[in-house]
Image (cartoon, rainbow, N blue to C red):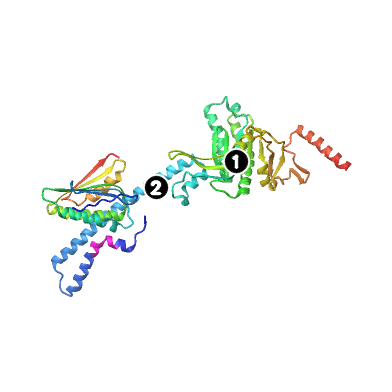
Amino acid sequence: MAECNIEGTKDTPKVYLSSEKKEITISGYSYPENSVEFYKPILETIDNAVASLKDDETFSLNFELLYFNSSTSKILIDIFDKLEESATTGKKIVVNWKYSGENESMAEYGNDFKEGLEAVSFNIIEVEK
Amino acid sequence: MSTSKSKGEIHDLFQSEHSVISHARELLASSGKSKIDAKEFEIILKGFSSALNKLEKIIRIHDRQQHEISRLSDKLSYISKQTSRYIPQQVYEAIFSKENQNEFALTVERKKMAVFFSDIVNFSEITQDIEPELLALTMNTYLNEMFNIAKEYGGTIDKTIGDALLIFFGAPKTLGEKEDVLACVNMAIAMRKSIHKLEIVLQQHGITKPIKVRMAIHAGFCTVGNFGNQDRMDYTIIGNPVNLASRLQNEAENNQILITQEVFTLIQDDIYCEKKNAVFVKGFHYPILCYEVFDLYKNMKKPNDISAFSEGFSVYFNNKLVSKDKKKEILVTLNKIIDTLKDT
């Protein structure tokens, strides 16, 4: 599994892939100047991780976003649709959508993303700040 | 961060949706007059359904974000309005101006400023027996009037200590050295004139003792800026001119505005002043030349006013303002002048 570790900035999220744990965590703010360009290596990493997933393995995606723009939301919808396709073919995929209790809107966004996903296990989890 | 996306970037975001449309166009072009294959149509339909589904989600999320931004904007407006009551207007404007998008820095600068001090004479005695609510009303009525006048003339209210006021001109905005000093003196004159309004309000609440103020202004180089740390800052001035203005204010008589030589030099063409005896004040080992401010020359040309100014002679007389006892003294003085003039 290729490594993908990106330090967060005030405009872009921190991305950390743990090959060992088979999980990727995306946290912070996401309003990159060019969302497509920023998320391209991340999408490739997710694709590779899912493709190399063995039958007894589960791939987890943790999202701990504080704010994201419309371009990011389009990319996230694409990611979740793709994951849903893979999960339909038998891949075990879990999405943990984490939000702070002080940011209730983030929970609602989670519900929007979750809508229509059946094969992917999509959890909306409140975390302490 | 770029706030607007280029057409190309948006196009890239919708690459999969564009490929569905391209596929549909190609199919339509190649099919001619023959029917489109049901399976192909199903693929296209699936693609459009997915695109529509995504669009609906994006709009829903976007609307929620807009609502959230609007809510936060209202909250920010409320906080900013509340905050503005606790910091000087000029400082507030400097912090929230478009030019100051970066943090209002912990900077200080040394510049020439006009420094104003005032207090109410015997304020403690006037208010010692009144209820706290009435004391609050008195203070708030007074400070409200003074703050409005300071704001009107562009002064930065540094601090209030009880009924005492420290206001300065020249930072964070300056109109120029002379203009700043002139605005400061004009403000002091306006404040003195407004005192009677305060007396009327207080009389309505049973406080009949007359309100008198003492004011002083000095101009000089001060250090001004934000002092404190990242958690709490105070935009203030420090320096000898501040001490001198404060000391001189203690020397002022009831309803008197005293100014120093430095101030007089800048405003003498616009405002009628009289030279007073030099005073010695604590902390300064030399006599302080000072002048009493009367009014703007333009304001003095009223039916009740008589004024004449030339080298070696200056007079301003307003019959309404002079008490009976003073009139006798003035008459004696005028007769002396007349006798002296007759003898020459």
Residue B23, disc: none
| Residue lying at the far right of the rendered structure | B343
Graded by Cα atoms within 10 Å as few (under 14), some (14 to 19) or many (20 or more), the crowding at tag 1 reads: many
Residue B73, disc: 2
Span highlighted in magenta in the image:
B11-18
Question: Which corner quadrant of the image does residue B53 belong to?
Answer: bottom left
Q: Is the residue B73 above or below the residue B159 in the image? A: below
User: In the picture, which quadrant includes the N terminus of chain B?
Assistant: bottom left
The secondary element bearing badge 2 is classed as helix
Please state the chain letter of the residue tagged with numbered disc 1 in the rendered image: B
> Are discs 2 and 1 both within one chain?
yes
Graded by Cα atoms within 10 Å as few (under 14), some (14 to 19) or many (20 or more), the crowding at tag 2 reads: few
Q: Position of residue B40 (x, y in %)?
A: 15, 66
Q: Position of residue A115 (x, y in %)?
A: 21, 50
**Which residue in the protein does label 1 denote?**
B115
State the residue at coordinates (27%, 60%): B13
Task: Give amino acid for label 1.
Answer: Val
